[in-house]
Image (cartoon, rainbow, N blue to C red):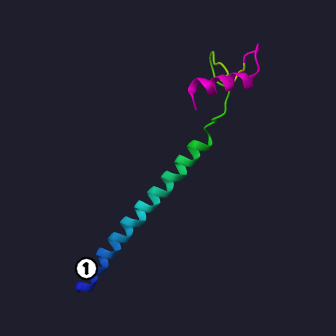
Amino acid sequence: MPWLKMLLHVLKIFILFLCCTLLFYFTLLWVNQEYENYHRYEKPKGAAVKVSAAAKDEPAWVQRLLLFYMDGE
């Protein structure tokens, strides 16, 4: 009969492992679905300003050159 007790312990461990694996799998599916519905590139709401807007009076390469000289890199 000791083999029957050992078999029950192994079966309990297997069921516990199976439940944890299924919980992990369905959690990954849920997280994946949440991020698929997340729109990263929507237009911003409110008074947002475009960061890469260049000044009208001088070309963009002049600003970048001045920034390069100011940073000293």
Determine whether 40 is above or below 53 in the image.
Answer: below
Residue extending farthest left: 2
Which of the two residues, 25 or 53, is positioned nearer the viewer here? Answer: 53
Q: Principal SS element in the magenta part?
A: helix
Which of the two residues, 11 or 28, is positioned nearer the viewer here? Answer: 28
Quarter occupied by the N terminus: bottom left
Residue 14 position, x and y percent, is: 38, 71
Left or right? Give the position of 7 relative to 30.
left
Residue 2 position, x and y percent, is: 22, 85
Determine whether 72 is above or below 54 in the image.
Answer: below
Q: Is residue 43 magenta?
A: no
Magenta range: 55-73
Say which residue appears at 40% left-offset and 60% top-offset: 20
Left or right? Give the position of 51 relative to 4.
right
Determine whether 65 is above or below 16 in the image.
Answer: above
Residue 18 position, x and y percent, is: 42, 66
Say which residue appears at 33% left-offset and 70% top-offset: 12
Which of the two residues, 17 or 15, is positioned nearer the viewer here? Answer: 17
* Mark 1 lies on residue: 5
Say which residue appears at 56% left-offset and 42% top-offset: 34
Quarter occupied by the C terminus: top right
Q: Which quadrant of the structure image shows residue 55?
A: top right
Q: Which quadrant of the structure image shows residue 21?
A: bottom left
